[in-house]
Amino acid sequence: MAVTVAVCASAGCSGTDPEEAHNRRETYCTRLAAWQHAERAAEGGDEVAGYAVVAAAKALDQEGLDVDGSHILQDTGLAVEGDPAAGGRAAAYCDGTGFETLMK
């Protein structure tokens, strides 16, 4: 039982295989980093990068790949709309899933 809980906590219990979960998380974090870069580079950010990161968050949400009670789709949408606390939570998701280097 404890092993099942640990696996669900680290890989998600969505039925997505671990490699696919890894790829979806990497895609999300890559798009989040691109959006953050665009946001810093231009006032108001890049609308296309915003759409791309929200789409990646939607895929994570649909597959149940949130971790530690995160609400990645909601946080990403709020971040793109300008909520810095939500942006911090989205970046923390990437830190928590092993993609912290993408957030620099």
Image (spheres, grey):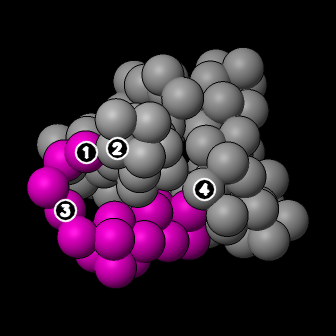
Q: Is residue 94 above or below residue 78?
A: below
Q: Please, what secondary structure does the residue beneath circle 3 have?
A: loop
Residue 68: where, in percent of width, then height?
54, 29
Tag shown at residue 4: 2
Give the mark nearest the N terminus, 4 or 2. Answer: 2
Q: Nearer the viewer, mark 3 or mark 2?
A: 2
Q: Upstream in the sequence, badge 1 or badge 2?
A: 2
**63, above or below 20, in the image:** above
Foreground label between 1 and 4: 1
Q: Amino acid at mark 1?
A: Cys
Q: CA distance from mark 1 to mark 2?
A: 9 Å
The span picked out in magenta is 13-30
Label 4 Cα crowd, 10 Å radius (few <14 / some 14-19 / many 20+): some
Q: Indicate whether 94 appears above or below 34.
A: above
> Where is mark 1, residue-wise?
13
Q: Which residue is mark 3?
A: 16
Question: In front: 100, or 42?
Answer: 100
Question: What is the quadrant of residue 13 in the picture?
Answer: top left
> What is the residue that sits farthest to the right in this orientation?
104
List x then y, in percent, for residue 18: 33, 71
Q: Could you say which is closer to the camera, residue 65 or residue 87?
A: 65
Which residue does the image show at 34% across and 35% down from the upper left?
A: 1
Give the crowd class for mark 3: few <14, some 14-19, many >=20 residues within 10 Å.
some
Q: Residue at x 67, y 66 (%)?
A: 99
Q: CA distance from mark 4 to mark 2?
A: 18 Å
Q: Was residue 103 drawn as part of the magenta stretch in this picture?
A: no
Quadrant in which the C terminus appears: bottom right
The residue under label 4 is 97
What predominant SS class does the magenta segment belong to?
A: helix
* Left/right of residue 80 with respect to residue 64 in the rendered view: right
